[in-house]
Amino acid sequence: MLTAVISGFIFALLIPFILGRLQSKSSLWVALLPLSLFGYFLSRISLVQQDGPIKVSYEWVPSIGINLDFYLDGLSLLFVLLISGVGTLVFVYTAAYLKGHPYLNRFYAYLSLFMASMLGLVLSDNIYTLFLFWELTSISSFFLIGFNNDSEASRKSALTALAITGFGGLFLLAAMVGLGHITDAYTISAMAPIAEMIKGHSLYGWVLLFLFLAAFTKSAQFPFHFWLPGAMKAPTPVSTYLHSATMVKAGVYLLARFTPILGNHEWWNGTLIAVGAITMVYAAVHALFRIDLKGILAYSTISALGILVFLIGLGTEEALLAASVFILVHALYKATLFLVTGIIDHETGTRDVTQLSGLRKVLLPVGIAALLAAVSNAGIPPSFGFVGKDLIYGATLGMGDLAWLFTLLAILTNVALLVAGFIAGIKPFIGKLPERYAAVHLPSPAMYVPPLILGTLGMLYGLFPGLLEAGLVQPAVSSLIGTTPDFHLQLWHGFNLILLLSVVTIGSGTGLYFLLKPSEKLLGKASRFERFSPETLITGFTVGFGLLAKGWTRFFQNGYLRYYLITILGFLSLLLGYRLFVGVELYIDTGLLSEITFYEAIVLLIMGVAIFFTVFSNSRLVAVASLGVVGYSFCLIFLFYSAPDLAMTQFSIDTLTVILFVLVLYNLPKYLKLSDNRVRIRDGLLSLIFGALISILALEVMNESVTKETTAYYAENAYILGKGKNVVNVILVDFRGFDTMVEITVLAIAAIGVFGLLKLHLRSTEKE
Amino acid sequence: MEILLVIIIGLLYAAGIYMMLRRSLVKLIIGLILLGNGANLLIFLLGKIVKGEPPIIGSTEKMLGELYADPVPQALILTAIVISFGLQAFAIILIKRAYKVVKTDDLDEMNATDEDL
């Protein structure tokens, strides 16, 4: 199983080189990878059916619980088959759709990367690798949405999608860390048996919140849904694969995966029902007002995802069964519709439904695929969609007191979805063919066969739902509810309430379809409400936040050294001053002080005067000379207090500095007084305050006793170990010899710099 | 005596910062030097000052006696003095060079790489 996951990553690495080398006309062979994966996972069906979930584990970073634990149960199986199956068709479709595109190799690399991440995600048992693969899908999705990177809208959509899903990813990590903390386990399968303990834990609410944020952002639930329509800027194969069939279902998968662990709690059910219901109705109604085919499909996808979240929220066995079936139903018809849209776009150059009609005359096989999908989407018998819709109504009707409300919402959504499906799947193909599309011709079979296959499957499974029952649906539901479910998928249930509801849905939907004519005007009306949409709010927030950050940065990074200094010192003074004021009792231990002698006092006095002249002199020469005096006074202080080495060093360095200064003085400008008195007083005050604080600090520190361990060690061992009598020297060249060597290196670099600056002759153009 | 030294340290810090807040590059360097000196003296003082007992082992002995000046701060300061010299030398030459090219030592006229600013 590791090979199955890893192969996609390796493939993604190699494919740009292979395709670049081959220069072959067709890249159909690339589809062999998803096809073989599909075959592999198909062969696992019977194994899972007989022996239960397959579990494999490879150690990665065992010390912190990060291992490559893979777990293939019914739910995972459903998803891996979808991913590899739809993947195969999308790979084939792409070969024709992007034929001759200069970056086709890159596209395949991203696509394989995505497929591998998605497989890893739904197979992961380890909560941290789950997060890892989750993030990988977001990242590969970013590259795919932004594939047309010369279009600004495309780049912007890619960023929005990454921001929203990446934001959710962080919450997923938080949720996983929380779960790991509660359970002390790192695998999902180990958490299921202790579900009750988790639900009783005080962190349960937080874990739930974070998990929901992750799932809702990924699966485009209200109010995070708006990245998905934007993501339609991607090439159509990407929209098909990522944004209808697989990636957006990752959030649904996450919720389904954690249903046995976190589910069946009022917070869980309540939130999911509310969010799912709002999303499904909101997006379904929105879909009616679009005129871009992909826009219609995007909103109807959001609505479908809402239905799935809603069903998981209901949480009953019927609801979970309906969810499992609907995942499959939706993937089949929505992928078909997307692929059809891609063909229409590719051949006619537009996706505007108000422009398109009569295409059946030129694109008949495509029209058949679209019709099959629209029928399944509408839930008209004998399609698979009919089976799915029956199950949904069955689930909502079984909800006791609120059954009528849930059923009503479901009907409303289904009616709107039906109309959207008809607009996208039927409308472009009926009616009169406009002149300008008369020359449209059928594309290569690689493009129209995949949607035909998917559309036909949607019909086949409707006629024979038993095909899927034992192999796919039953294991999937049983991994959701924990026991073996007892049900039979049927097309015909006899005359009952559910059938009546279906008839009502189909009837009113078809009626609405004939009443509603998609047009610019309608779109304009709908977009008037954009002002209140979450997208506008979040975009506004982003812009505002950017401005705030910019202002903040401008304020602090203003480019003036003195303001940086003032900020730092002012803050430091406040902090130090506050601490010294409240926390420290000021006192001076006179017993520790040494007496003042006359000659020392004189040196300090000289130093004080020299400092004064350094600061306030109007002549640079005086200032530099005074600086020299300060330095020489230092030599004397070092001499008085038993530091002959320091005195010598200070003396030579100071002499050199003064000489250097004097050497460059003559070609410097006049010593200008650049600031006015107000500024000088401000600076003076700040400096004095800071100086005073340092003095107080020094006084305080002197009261503390110092541990002299290091000193004692050097004092004892300087001669014994270092064979030197001058302890300071021994420390520098022996005990800390490496430091000194580095110091010499620094000096050497400075010397090279000085030399370079002196010898550098700028050309006249560079001088300016 | 320590009180006086502490006052001098405060004075050196204040003078150093005041100079660093000026707009002239030369003053900035002078400020840095003063500040560095202040810091050195602070470290020196915190090692407890001792008169007339340099950390040098007598010719007949194998280790330091009972009372001696702390060699560790001295080693630190020695390093600091030398490093700051490297900095000063480089900075002084850089000022000279920069003045030759841009004809100013006013920091406010040097805070952008673009000419038109």
Image (spheres, coloured by chain):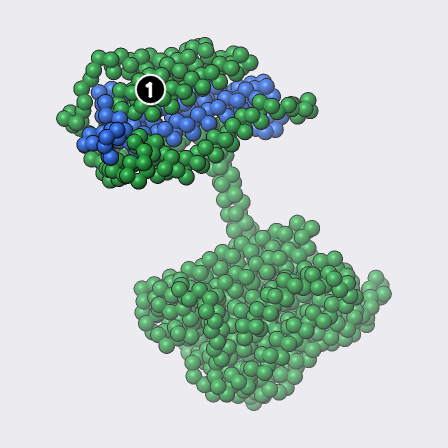
Chain colours: A green, B blue
Residue drawn at (31%, 12%) of the image = A606
Residue A356 lies in what quarter of the image?
bottom right
Name the residue furthest front.
B60
Residue A445 lies in what quarter of the image?
bottom right
What x and y, as percent, mark residue B11? Answer: 32, 20
User: Is residue A584 at all visible to an observer of this figure?
Assistant: no
For disc 1, the marked residue is A634
What x and y, as percent, mark residue A732? Answer: 36, 34
Residue drawn at (66%, 49%) of the image = A152
What x and y, as percent, mark residue A516? Answer: 66, 66
Question: Mark 1 — on which chain does it sit?
Answer: A
From the viewer's side, name the closer residue of B71 and A316. Answer: B71
**In which quadrant of the rendered image does the N terminus of chain A lie?**
bottom right
User: Is residue A185 at all visible to an observer of this figure?
Assistant: yes
Name the residue furthest left.
A591
**In which quadrant of the rendered image does the C terminus of chain A lie?**
top right
Residue drawn at (45%, 62%) of the image = A172
- Amino acid type at image mark 1: Phe
Residue A289 lies in what quarter of the image?
bottom right
In the image, taking residue A437 as reference, residue B10 lies left or right, namely: left
From the viewer's side, name the closer residue of A485 and A609. Answer: A609
What x and y, as percent, mark residue A603? Answer: 29, 14
